[in-house]
Image (cartoon, rainbow, N blue to C red):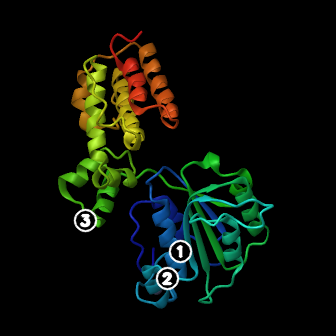
Amino acid sequence: MIDGIFDVVGAAGPRTFFEHLTTATLSHGYLFTGPQGSGKKTFARALGRSLLCVTPKRTLLGWCGTCSGCTRIEAGTHPDFYFAEGQLKIGDRDGGGFHETEETTARDLVRQLSLHSYAGGKRVFVLGDADFTREAANALLKFFEEPPAAVVLIVTTNALGRVLPTIRSRLVEVTFPLLSEDEIVRILGRHGIAGDDALRAASIANGSATRALAYLIEGEGATRDAAVEWFFAAAQGGEADASGWATRPTLEAGLETVKTLARDWIALGLGGSVPLLARDQRARLEELPAREPAAFVRMLSAIGDAERIARTNVSPPLVADLVRMALAPSSR
Ligand SMILES: [Zn+2]
């Protein structure tokens, strides 16, 4: 039961978890984990908004939408709501200061954390997709030693291994599952995307609203289409033109598509009724002849290699060619 507005799609587990908390049982730090695009930052914002709404409510989650707290959150001007994304840096220790960049610095954060609430209530800090340098982590640990009572810190990550154990152990972990296709369609609807476009994007988004939006808005649809055509040409040993996806800005997304298709091909080759990730390509995948298990293993290994090399300066067409050789029928 939620008193007020809480318009977050999906995240049933986290929602239930916080529904059972009160301001008295709320911890000072949470770690939201789960795949990219599963709604961690959206939920963190909504939780922050719930905590900063000043209208009395019977539940922890939920906000009124009209009070001074809600209005300021909506306008992005709430002095007790701090939202930062990406790497937390800290500069040279002997330099006495930190790098003057746009990036969040840990010292700035720690200083902010030590301030009192402007509005007299809680202060909420969200560190989205947090990536701590070791020094930044150490600076933050000072906060954990004596966390101020009214502060709630929410860290989100899709790479749990990159959160230092010393930080992780001080946060309460909340896991976000992949979104269902229905949930992605509902989220796309809020972005004004409906109908066949929304259904198609949701069906190929592998449970990630971020990926569905990227596909529709950021032109990743063209990258995917090019990678799909390339994949089937390569798998049949034909002329495979990689120019539509093997470029620096699109290489990662293109390889992701190729990997998804290769996995589905292998899944079909192993038989059974496994759910495919690229369901829209099922008919074409079924037409591809199955390979020996060893060939499938080589294929996945080559794609893994390609993903690693893609992060270096090797030219994207060369990366694509490495994968093409592993996909080709003559591959031994
Ligand atoms: Zn309110």
Looking at the rendered structure, the kind of residue marked 2 is Thr
Looking at the rendered structure, the kind of residue marked 3 is Gly
On the image, numbered disc 1 is attached to which residue? 48
The residue under the point 42% across, 26% down is: 318
Circles 1 and 3 in contact, beta carbons < 8 Å: no
The residue under the point 41% across, 33% down is: 316
Q: Which of marks 3 and 2 is in front?
A: 2
Whether label 2 lies within 8 Å of ligand 1 gets the answer no
Q: Nearer the viewer, residue 225 or 201?
A: 225
Looking at the rendered structure, the kind of residue marked 1 is Gly
On the image, numbered disc 3 is attached to which residue? 192
Which of the labelled discs sits on residue 254, or is there none? none
Residue 102 vertical position relative to residue 286 in the rendered view, above or below? below
- Name the secondary structure under disc 2: loop
Of pointers 1 and 3, the one earlier in the residue sequence: 1
Circles 3 and 2 in contact, beta carbons < 8 Å: no
Q: Nearer the viewer, mark 1 or mark 2?
A: 2
- Name the secondary structure under disc 1: helix
Q: In this view, does 255 lie to the left or right of 230?
A: right
Q: Report crowding for label 3: few under 14, some 14 to 19, many 20 or more residues within 10 A (C-alpha).
A: few
Q: Separation of disc 3 and disc 2 at Cα? A: 26 Å
Question: Which quadrant is home to the C terminus?
Answer: top left
Q: Report crowding for label 2: few under 14, some 14 to 19, many 20 or more residues within 10 A (C-alpha).
A: few
- Name the secondary structure under disc 3: loop
- Whether residue 22 is visible to the viewer of this picture, yes or no, is no
Q: Nearer the viewer, residue 218 or 2?
A: 218
On the image, numbered disc 2 is attached to which residue? 77
Of pointers 3 and 2, the one earlier in the residue sequence: 2
Q: Nearer the viewer, residue 138 or 180?
A: 138
* Position of residue 40 measured from the top left corner of the image (x, y, whole percent): 49, 60
Q: Separation of disc 1 and disc 3 at Cα? A: 25 Å
Name which quarter of the figure residue 284 lies in: top left
